[in-house]
């Protein structure tokens, strides 16, 4: 509520960057279902499976050896806050996809996170140069509540599609609804079209 009262004054340029029905927050809110998992890097792993030629698993040391990239982006939560000018750093999703060798039958993806959280996307949304497996935000390792050690970042969709504490990607021939999507949120989740709920 304080956020709403002290809404920052936005320049005309910045206003155009805020999707319909969103307000800008200066601090980074924390939002998730359940509790913050305690993650041990020594036993952490990440699985890539489903409609791929080469399913594989990597550990934290393996992740450190992958090529890196950073993105500068705005994030938009379906609960109506947006945060502008965030920097995320990590491994481009295209590196993960290339190594897996997607089959023609791979059309959709489900990200799997700690404690059973899932979020689904069509492949063409995931397979983009602005999508990262991020281990840093604004120059710092992710805080536990923001997804330590690793989260997905999908800038073009409401932020629930960006799974925190991600542990794997499953490629599928058909769409399979994720956690919030089953709960009545909109499957497409484009903030610019205000696709919040399934009947929007
Ligand atoms: N594992 C997991 N990831 C999740 C969620 C969740 O409940 N569990 N919530 C999503 C939602 S609704 C939002 S808005 C963002 C919030 O990320 P933040 O807490 O870093 O702002 O995480 C997304 N990723
Ligand atoms: Mo959200």
Image (cartoon, rainbow, N blue to C red):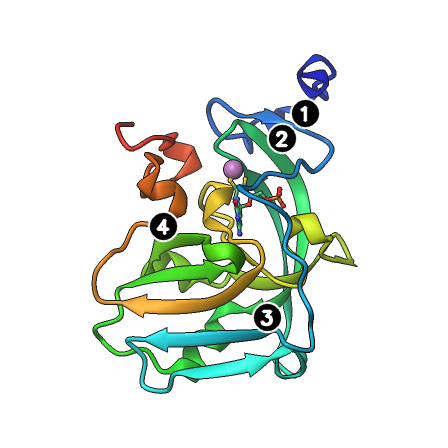
The answer to whether marks 1 and 3 mark residues whose Cβ atoms lie closer than 8 Å is no
Which numbered disc flags the more N-terminal residue, 3 or 2?
2
Mark 4 crowdedness (10 Å alpha carbons): few <14, some 14-19, many ≥20: many
Ligand 1 image position (quadrant): top right
In this picture, is 136 found above or below 180?
below
Instruction: Quadrant for the C terminus, please.
Output: top left
Please indicate whether residue 118 sits to the left or right of residue 197 in the image: right
**Residue 196 horizontal/vertical position (percent):** 38, 31
- Give the CA distance from mark 3 to mark 2: 28 Å
Q: Nearer the viewer, mark 1 or mark 3?
A: 3
Question: What residue is pinned by disc 3?
Answer: 91
Residue 14's tag is 2
- Is label 2 in contact with label 1 (beta carbons under 8 Å)? yes
Q: Disc 2 versus disc 1: distance between alpha carbons?
A: 5 Å
Residue 107, how many percent across, how many down? 26, 65
Find residue 122 and name its label: none
Q: Which marked residue is nearer to the observer: mark 4 or mark 1?
A: 4
The residue beneath circle 1 is 11
Label 4, on which residue?
178
182, 86: nearer the viewer: 182
Question: Secondary structure under badge 3?
Answer: strand
Residue sticking out furthest to the bottom: 54
User: Of helix, strand and loop, which one carries label 2?
Assistant: helix
């Amino acid at each position: 509520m304080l956020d709403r009262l002290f809404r920052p004054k936005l320049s005309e340029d910045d206003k155009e960057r805020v999707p319909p029905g969103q307000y800008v927050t200066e601090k980074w809110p924390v939002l998730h279902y359940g509790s913050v998992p305690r993650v041990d890097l020594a036993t952490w792993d990440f699985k890539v499976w489903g409609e791929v030629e080469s399913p594989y698993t990597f550990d934290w040391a393996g992740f450190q050896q992958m090529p890196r990239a950073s993105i500068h982006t705005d994030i938009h939560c379906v609960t109506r806050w947006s945060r502008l000018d965030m920097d995320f750093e990590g491994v481009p999703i295209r590196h993960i996809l290339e190594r897996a060798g997607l089959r023609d039958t791979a059309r959709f993806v489900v990200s799997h996170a700690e404690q059973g959280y899932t979020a689904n996307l069509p492949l063409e949304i995931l397979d983009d140069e602005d999508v990262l497996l991020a281990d840093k935000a604004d120059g710092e390792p992710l805080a536990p509540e923001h997804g330590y050690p690793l989260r997905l970042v999908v800038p073009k969709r409401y932020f629930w599609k960006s799974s925190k504490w991600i542990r794997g990607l499953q490629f599928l021939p058909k769409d399979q609804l994720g956690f919030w999507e089953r709960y009545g949120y909109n499957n497409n989740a484009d903030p610019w079209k205000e696709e919040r709920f399934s009947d929007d």
